[in-house]
Amino acid sequence: MTKRVRDTGRKAKRIRDTGGRAKRVSSNQVAKALGAERVGKAEDRPVFSLAGLYRELGERLRSTGGRPALEGTTRRQKIPISEADWEELEHLSESLSEQGTRASPGQIASVLLHQMLTNLDPAEAEELLKKKA
């Protein structure tokens, strides 16, 4: 059995990047540069794919020096959620971080909830409830 050696030396000083951040390029700028045209708005479609979620977060996350904030949000609300759902949100957060978008699990949940609420049709829901009764 080998003896574990413990490093008791001084910790290395943390390196911080103090250089300027690269300017964010909007999807409109990319479309113009490629000669593409818009065929709809992101708000018209629900975000059901990781690529769609990544795009929506890229458009709405804004940094002013600290952790990027989700543009358009004004409230911080406690919402009951299962442990499994939270773990899935954490997994999505890690996956998006690997792609360059640092969004918290709560920010991801906010975007998904917003998209679902935006695409709800109250008349359709009422019809479904009537059929069920």
Image: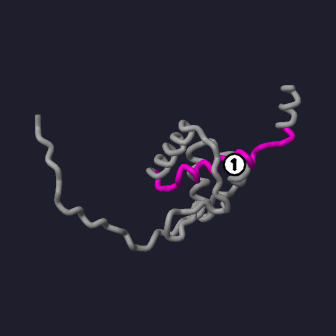
Residue 34 in magenta stretch: no
- Find disc 1 in the rendering and name its residue: 115
Residue at x-position 49% and y-position 43%: 91
- Mark yes or no: residue 62 visible: yes
Residue at x-position 31% and y-position 67%: 15
> Horizontally, is 20 left or right of 31 in the view?
left
Task: Give the percent coordinates (x, y) of residue 73.
Answer: 66, 60
Task: Say above or below: 21 vs 9.
Answer: below
Residue at x-position 60% and y-position 65%: 29
> Horizontally, is 70 left or right of 65 in the view?
right
Residue 120 in magenta stretch: yes
User: Which portion, as a residue range, is magenta?
Assistant: 99-124
Give the quadrant of the C terminus.
Answer: top right
User: Of 40 and 66, which appears nearest the observer?
Assistant: 66
Task: Give the percent coordinates (x, y) of residue 124.
Answer: 84, 37
Task: Say above or below: 106 vs 26.
Answer: above
Image-quadrant location for residue 1:
top left
Q: What amino acid type is highlighted by mark number 1?
A: Gln
